[in-house]
Amino acid sequence: MNDYLSSAKKQFSYYKMLGDKTFEQLVEEQLFMQLNECNSIGTIVKHLHGNMLSRWTDFMSSDGEKEWRMREAEFENDIESRTEMMSKWEEGWQCLFNALNSLRTEDLNKEIYIRNMGHSVTEAINRQLSHYSYHIGQIVLTGKMICGNEWTSLSIPKGKSKEYNAEKFAKDKRREHFTDDL
């Protein structure tokens, strides 16, 4: 189970990195563009921030949907700068990693609640990992659409699969997390 916690932390770090690398490719005003009336990247970050603070604050001792959370306000496109957006981004992730780093293997089967619905700690982590990867995918796709041909791939670039696989298969079989060599 220690492998599970380590793997979960690496997966969350991977998704954070995808967001970070997307933000690096965009100028400030692009972070707040709404394509086809969809949420801007800034708005998605604002929602993730609210969700992360609510879910991970007092993770083991209080419901994951805090009374102070203003979920509907998370979808107002009112962040005014890259600095403000990045502050929310980093604060949310810090809250998440602080909670994960406090967990011990024996905590994984304990029950916590989200909106009065019981989850094992493992289930709650999986729920949030899925939720955040969904929204990070939205951030990456929006960034790619905004950048167009100027986009730098965050995965295996189109047409480079053969070279990528040759590099991977040139190494001996080993046990490691796929993010270890990123």
Image (cartoon, rainbow, N blue to C red):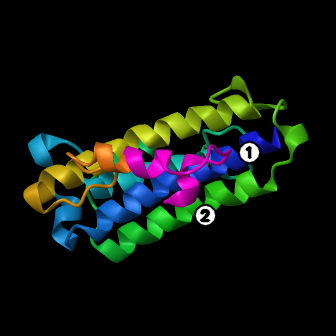
How many numbered discs, if any? 2
Residue position for label 2: 94
Query: Could you tell me how far apart the alpha carbons at marks 1 and 2 are, in whole angstroms?
Result: 16 Å
Which amino acid, by three-letter code, is at mark 2? Answer: Gln
Counting residues from the N terminus, which is met first, the one under dot 1 or under dot 2? Answer: 1
> Measuring 38% from the left and 57% from the top, which residue is drawn there?
19
Q: Is residue 138 left or right of residue 116?
A: left
Residue 79 appears anywhere in the view: no
- Seen in the picture, residue 113 relative to 87 is either above or below; the reply is above
- Seen in the picture, residue 100 relative to 98 is either above or below; the reply is above
> Measuring 30% from the left and 43% from the top, which residue is drawn there?
161
Name the residue nearer the viewer: 24 or 72.
24
92 drawn magenta:
no
Which residue sits furthest right?
A: 106
Q: Is residue 23 left or right of residue 9?
A: left
Q: Secondary structure at mark 1?
A: helix
Please report contact status of discs 1 and 2: CB closer than 8 Å, yes or no. Answer: no
Segment tinted magenta in the rendering = 165-182
Q: Nearer the viewer, mark 1 or mark 2?
A: 1
Q: Residues within 10 Å of mark 1 (few under 14, many from 20)?
A: some
Residue position for label 1: 5
Q: Pinpoint residue 34: horizontal percent, then vertical percent.
A: 15, 50
Q: Residues within 10 Å of mark 2 (few under 14, many from 20)?
A: some
Which amino acid, by three-letter code, is at mark 1? Answer: Leu
Name the residue nearer the viewer: 164 or 113.
164
The tag on residue 98 is: none
